[in-house]
Amino acid sequence: MAMYLCPQDGTRAETTTLTWCCPVCRGPWDLDFEVAGPLSLNSLTGRVNSLWRYEEALPLASPATTLGEGRTPLVPLTGTVTAKLDFLMPTLSFKDRGAVMLAELARRLSPERVIADSSGNAGTAVAAYCARASLPCTVYVPEGTSPKKTEQIRAHGARLEIVPGGREATALAARTAADAPGTFYASHVFNPYFLHGTKTYVYEMWEDLGGRLPDAIAVPVGNGTLLLGAALATAELHAQGLIDERPALIAVQAEAVSPLAAAFRADADGLLDTPAGAATPTLAEGIAIPRPPRAHAILAAVRESGGTFLTVTEDQIRTAQLDLAARGFYVETTGVACWAAVGGWTDRSVVVPLCGAGLKTGLAG
């Protein structure tokens, strides 16, 4: 049975509790979980056409909360760069992969309330899946969040709490509320079930590429949930002998908010000690995270894969959004960051996620 495990001090807790963080260090949980058995391409034939087809690799089974999420297509953009169209998910972003896991876990625990905090996409996904599971939901978002995202959250019936300030102030408000009795904190950062949902991004890639992976996987990184999910999947596939080598993980940040890239370039194991200041605005609002709680794990995962960090400017984001639109893909500004960073690569194969629909933010000014 899966258990929560603190990577910092070894504290453990049952996953049947509502404990949302390590009670000793207040850090995020990992999940002590082993894949049930090896997958094979032949074994997937005839299975449900959603991410739940990889049941051996998931910590939950037989879901009641699904919206048919997953199985998004791979489409070549150049001779070496391929896009995975995760903006085709039910709530129009990749966050559905993790949100369905959190909502299904919450449904089984029957809390009095579910809360989440988000810059938009995770909040819309949690709101939708809580609606599916008939769970009361409150979503905390920072002021300045895209009106289209807040509209979507309200449309799913969730209560919206708009927090003055930036992403850190929003997270603090949600974590304070999460300590109330009877509360399930559907945190895409602190709850590791979310990461085990996002890892299906790579399982699908492996299946659709005929049992192999590209040389590199590029992902936009703020709190790092897609990157850490990708690291989990590549480790599991390698351990099962289903891939010979693990691909390099290419982490992409907006130059305006790039604390992890700065730490990587300084060869640091964690975030650098920098004075707090006013938040720098960026078009890539979904990855504008000044102090990601899983920074140590993100940096370690990139290094262990032989990958690197890349940053993109605001002008590169604008150009990349227009370029993808000219190719037929209308993607939100955060979701074009990887194309901006690696779209010109010709020396190795790489997959980039188009991870949010353009309708969520509109065209960059």
Image: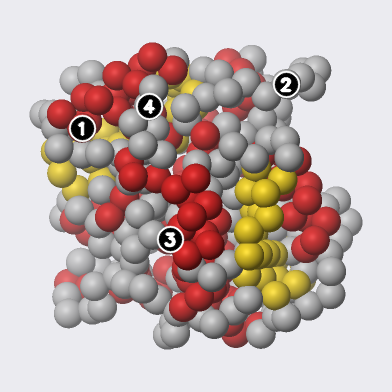
- What SS does tag 3 mark? helix
Towards the viewer: 307 or 196:
196
Q: Let me know if residue 66 appears in the view.
A: yes
Res. 158 image quadrant: bottom right
Give the label on residue 96, or none.
3
Between marks 1 and 4, how big is the CA–CA gap?
12 Å
Foreground mark, 1 or 4, reads 4
Towards the viewer: 340 or 149:
149
Which badge, 1 or 4, is on the more N-terminal residue? 1
Q: Where is residue 110 in the image (x, y as percent from the top left)?
A: 66, 85
- Depicted 272 relative to depicted 84: above or below: above
Drawn side of residue 316 relative to residue 330, left or right: right
Q: Are marks 2 and 4 in contact (CB under 8 Å)?
A: no
Towards the viewer: 249 or 52:
52
Q: What amino acid does circle 4 point to?
A: Ala
Classed neighbour count for the residue bearing mark 3: other residues with Cα under 10 Å, few (<14), some (14–19), many (≥20): many
- What SS does tag 4 mark? loop
Q: Let me know if residue 306 appears in the view.
A: no
Which badge, 2 or 1, is on the more N-terminal residue? 2
Q: Where is residue 45 in the image (x, y as percent from the top left)?
A: 17, 75
- In this view, the residue farthest toward the left is 79
Q: Say which residue label 1 marks.
A: 325
Which badge, 3 or 1, is on the more N-terminal residue? 3
Foreground mark, 2 or 4, reads 4
Towards the viewer: 137 or 226:
137
Residue at 59% in and 55% down: 188
Q: Say which residue label 2 marks.
A: 278
Give the label on residue 364, or none.
4
Which badge, 2 or 4, is on the more N-terminal residue? 2
Residue at 47% in and 65% down: 155
Q: What amino acid does circle 2 point to?
A: Ala
